[in-house]
Image: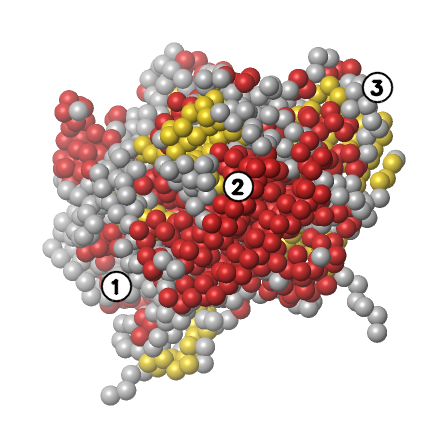
Amino acid sequence: MNNPTFTLDGKTIPFTEGQTIIQAAIAASVYIPHLCFNPEFKAHGSCKLCTVKANGRKTASCTAQPQPDMIVESNIQELNDERRALLQMLFVEGNHFCPSCEMSGQCQLQATAYELNMMSPHFDHFFPDRPLDASHPEYLLDFNRCILCSLCVQASRDVDGKNVFALAGRGINSHLIVNASQLAETGFSGDDKAAHVCPVGVILKKRVGFVVPVGQRKYDLLPISALAKGD
Amino acid sequence: MPVPAKLRVATTSLAGCFGCHMSILDIDERLLALLELIEFDRSPLTDIKHCGPCDIGIIEGGVCNAENVHVLREFRANCKTLIAIGACAINGGLPAQRNHLSVSTILNEVYQTQHGLVGGFIPNDPELPLLLDKVHPIHEVVKIDYFIPGCPPSADAIWKVLTDLLAGKTPELGHGLISYD
Amino acid sequence: MSNSLETAQHPETLRRIAIDPISRVEGHGKVTILLDENNHIHQVRLHIAEFRGFEKFIQGRPYWEVPVMVQRLCGICPVSHHLAASKALDAIVGAKQLTPTADKIRRLMHHGQMLQSHALHFFHLCSPDLLFGFDSEVSQRNIVGIAAKYPETARRGILLRKYGQEVIRHTAGKRIHGTSSVPGGVNKSLSLAERDELLKDSEEMVAWSRDAVQLVKELHFKNSELYNSFGAFSANIMSLTAADGSMDLYDGQLRGRDAAGHIMFDGVKDQDYTTLIAEQVKNWSYMKFPYLKTLGPEQGWYRVGPLSRVQNCDFIATPLAEIERREFIAYSGKSLLHAPLAYHWTRMIEMLHAAETIRDLLHDNDIMGSDLTVRGERGFEGVGIIEAPRGTLIHHYRVDENDLISMCNLIVSTTHNNQAMNEAVRRVAQQYLHGHEITEGLLNHIEVAIRAFDPCLSCATHALGKMPLEVEVLDASGEQMSYLARAGDGASINC
Amino acid sequence: MVSQVSTHAGYLDDILARHHHRTNQLLQVLIEAQAHYGYIHTSAIDYLSLQLQLPRAQIEGVASFYSFLYLQPHGDYRVLFSDNITDRMLGNMDLMLSLCKQLWVEPGKISEDGLLFVSTTSCTGMCDQGPALLINNIAINQLTGERINEICVLIRERVPLLEWPAEYFEIADNIRRSDILLGSNFQSGRSLTALLQRGTAETLQQIKVSRLRGRGGAGFSTGMKWELCQAATGREHFVVCNADEGEPGTFKDRVLLNRYADMVFEGMTLCARIIGAKRGFLYLRGEYRYLLEPLLSVLQGRREKNLLGTSILGNNDFNFDIEIHLGAGAYVCGEESALIESLEGHRGTPRNRPPFPVTHGYLNQPTVVNNVETFAATCLIAQNGGAWYAGIGTDTSSGSKILSVSGDCERPGLYEYPFGVTVAQVLSDCGAKDTQAVQISGPSGVCIAAGEFQRRIAFDDIPTAGAFMVFDQSRDMFEVARNFVHFFAHESCGFCTPCRVGTSLLSNMMDKLSQGHGSACDLVEIEKLNLLLQSTSHCGLGHSACNPVLDTIAKFKPAYDIRLTHKEFTPAFDLDSALSQARQMTGRDDAGAHLRECE
């Protein structure tokens, strides 16, 4: 049997019932920039980086489903300019000091910004004050880098069945919280799925920072787009 | 055929570590070739005190005190094209990690309660520039034309941008050249 | 022994001359001079005008971030900070004895940095002064001028620095602000290919370094009167030395001598530095003033860096550098040589030592080993001391039970030399400016003295050629009377 | 700690019992907990977490989403000044500062004695009788300097709210023009009787014939919505009345619920019968908390008349009842999927759509969500037939529309017109003079300039949820837009990047201009931000957040131009005040200790 298809930047992409545009693209090893989407989880749809033009209408490709023969545009300047601006918003919203961040070179936010040629944060910085949570013996939380993708919330709730993380606050004051006054008092463990889904540098295993030399880090050799699935 | 006029270039460091200037030197032998194409105005390379009319200004470091503001304005006023080089100029870099603290907290810590300090107080001589309450990326203070990210950017990245500009092209960095650390 | 020109009695009655900016790196510095109507000097100060507050904002950060973070203090000698922090934090992870590979990779990195920094300082920055003269044609007095008049010297300078940077790149991952030194060891060793690439030029670097020593030596001999007296002042000296008394730039124990050369203290372990040193604040500089507790702030200040190290150690373990050290000691005679310009000679001796050390380490297969880190009993406080290109560098941290930094104290090389540099510029002011009409050339003498120390504030300004200079002469009321600026063409403008 | 918990267990047990320990009731429980204790104590969260078997982080996440809920002490008197542009025009800022001055408290902070908290809040829906405030979530209107002085005395003397003068709390309906809806003398049950006589299929047909479209602004066909929901399969069907009237400048639902609640509930009951729902909800915005008891008694009255509850009007298969849910200060909950999230006791974050509520709504079951006015209108149709209704208004827009008129006019209040009325007509009816502009349908709507007053209120010309704010020539349209932009930044739910960060960046840019740091570069930036918000935001809030700016730039450019005072880019912050801390620390005030804005 042959699946229905749609075209993504001119390339024919087969899809199956229920697949979203980005799922079909990933299955066909085509990269669409994304941050809050992780193939292992239900789409969150919040970062909006994966916005594409589907038959001319802009929509988040992680939640929109393709229709047969749909014309989808992704890698075009209009969209990449908007994606760059969204990245710049994320960079100025938090405190992203790549030079001393142990996730530098292995950070999806950074790699995506490289991919989209983000040369500067452009906007004025918010420089928020976000204290660390180092209470846990094995793990550190550096909220300065949180982009509110809520993958850790999903993983802890849906996979680990622990609900260690949650989003709190509203608007620009939205922030990640833990299910106690500090992480050490939650049931969080390094074996949790939630310990391994952060696309940036918030949830960090202690005492192993900078163990991978420059040149051998995840995105040193290939750009995120070349890793096709880009996760 | 007449020799084309050399591009006039000025450079300076504000609240930076000079690593970006070191990375400029890391173009190694290419420096000698570069000197055929450009001439330096105000820069650690020369003894020119005030920036005169220039084609290109290159600024390392963020804006942390009053003096930085004056120098930055002087460059913007004189340079046709102003380039921010390195993390500190572009997002404040490491010095901006003080931004969640008040200036008073930091001054007290460093000059009054610091380990091994005897009879401390806060330097207040008019010869010293005062600190701004926050360290700012330079694009928050003046208009910037181009950015070369990195801490520091590699010599190859700097070379690429300079040669693009010399060739009259819009500078572009591809994978491997664009970096934030 | 400290100089009387620090503070004038009646500043309000005096004219002010500012040399601003001299530079930045570890901040921006400037010199101010107060003189009376007869051009008699009453006050000279070297102000360090930038402030970053690393000690404060590093608190609350995880300790393993620190070696990567603090090197951003200085882009000229980041490796020094990277390693000093790592050494301090080795104690936190309980790494009493690093693996041979880790120890040798760090030493290789450090000597690569010594080579590049010393080459930069001499060839790119100071050679113009020394080869053309202190008040020679300004437009010629920079690397461009050197490249024109002495192309081979300029080329070698650039290539020596390049080689040092390449040693750093292969050992640290990047030429500037690398990440390979981690608490307890390193995250990479050298591959065979990397080793061979470095090895092929190593002998030439030794040869060129040796020529550089000869060049400086000749300059010193040719004008020994000037070189021995220019800004000279006697001072205590301090540096690390190895247990056997030999020069060790990476590790060792603190040894201090008085101005006459008698050992005041020796074998002081790094974690005991606080028993030796205290710091003082002066209202006119953001940079603190360290001194030896036993002697107090007036008598206890001291000098660090190549001039101190070469005279403080008993011998240098690499043969060619040791020959040069002996010649220098023989030249200086019984007591210590305190002349700032002698820094250049000793700096080149150290560059030769660095080149020899790099070559020797490259022949040691441990640098290609795979045993990179060790861990031991968790500690909560650590001190790391290293000899940076421009002098002793101290990093001191406390870490809480949650792995976050709770206290940080840094005493960088330039800070140790703070009082010494002030003494030097005051001496030069007395020797050359006192009673004379101030000219650009005279003011350059002050910079030459500062530059000799290769302070981190000169790492920066210095970065290639001479620093911009402005002289403004004000009358007692602060009104500007005349303005003199060094323009690009070197002409003095009076307006 | 144990005693701590027991303190809270005391009152929480009653609240939980009232809500049958249902986790869907979480928001309601939190609202009542705060009403009792003044704020939501961390031990209270622990106890609720235990009792409701919910993670405490989830409870904290919900509580921190709604601006009327506090997790720290906020004093015995919590005074929130309504800060819609119409309140501003009536001088609310001076009144707030006067109150703060008299009671020694800073806006946004709790007084040192912990007695009171003073701040601003988004439009409280009293624009026809402002300036307005909420004190412990109860509305006080028609504020004057005199009334503020009296209030200060009452607070200083700690007089309980219940003992405050009754006239403070009087709220006028201000119905200025009635038409088919406001003019109908509705009698309970008539529409239901008509429905039962005509049958559900035929009644639905009539509603489709009437061409009734949703009155919330979007204008989706009501008949089609009900039909889709009816056709959708699910465990249970639900009817939801959206009374979260948060659009600044709108207050028609306030009046409808105060005077026509019976009609609204009957409309919901019609819908229930047609789609086969047994349960319905009215989501009442927190600002209208004072309407809760009256509404409950109306519901009770209908139950007694057998118009609600089991076997309605004697039909065994006709069972339907209505619960009232309170909001707690979150405009975004006016978006139907966010409203449903809130009904379920979650943060009010709009869902990814599709699927839509008609198939996956409350508890993922088929749900009709309609506006208060829409439900009321269905009663008229049930009684008078679809053709009659379709004959009123215009081809695209049948029936009437209630407008909430406020701002610079002599007679603010409710005006009901058949669709198709011109803006000019409304302006002359309400006694507006020298009008410069009208903001129709609130900040997310359109700004109409003088040249366009012949345009009509209709879905194919100017669609509206009802807000009609009038600005005369004395008003600064830049400040109007700035007020609206701050509103969106305050109300953004924070879910998607463009709206969370973009609305704050946009209001910072507008502040930069108003503080005199503006240059041409900034206008370019503002327009770029506008486009990004429009094209990438998750929901309508983000899409429309920039409308006020786009409109005013297009129609009142001079108001911006006078603020682009600098030729060159200028920092958003004041350089000299950025040195003030250091000046203080060093005691310096010499020339070098200052910076001028430009050199």
Residue C140 position, x and y percent, is: 77, 50
User: Could you tell me which secondary element the residue under label 2 belongs to?
Assistant: helix
Query: Which residue position holds label 3?
Result: C37
Asked whether, in this view, residue C69 is left or right of residue D163, the answer is right
Q: Residue at x 72, y 63 (%)?
A: B37
Residue A120 position, x and y percent, is: 54, 54
Residue C20 position, x and y percent, is: 70, 35
Asked whether, in this view, residue C180 is left or right of residue D362, the answer is right
User: Could you tell me which secondary element the residue under label 1 belongs to?
Assistant: loop
Letter of the chain that mark 3 sits on in the rendering: C
Q: In which quarter of the image is the C terminus of chain D?
A: top right
Query: Which residue position holds label 2?
Result: C326
Measured Cα–Cα span from mark 3 to mark 2: 48 Å
Q: Can residue C34 be seen in this view?
A: yes
Measured Cα–Cα span from mark 1 to mark 3: 81 Å
Q: Is residue D378 visible?
A: no
Figure quadrant of residue C217 = top right
Mark 3 or 2, nearer chain start: 3
Letter of the chain that mark 2 sits on in the rendering: C
Letter of the chain that mark 1 sits on in the rendering: A
Farthest-out residue, left: D316
Q: Residue at x 58, y 32 (%)?
A: C333
Q: Which of marks 1 and 2 is in front?
A: 2
Residue D463 position, x and y percent, is: 50, 57
User: Could you tell me which secondary element the residue under label 3 belongs to?
Assistant: loop
Q: Which mark is residue A40?
A: 1
Q: In which quarter of the image is the N terminus of chain D?
A: top left
Q: Which of marks 1 and 3 is in front?
A: 3
Q: Residue at x 55, y 37 (%)?
A: C329
Measured Cα–Cα span from mark 1 to mark 2: 69 Å
> Which amino acid does the dot numbered 1 rest on?
Glu
Mark 1 Cα shell of 10 Å, populated few (<14), some (14-19), many (≥20): few
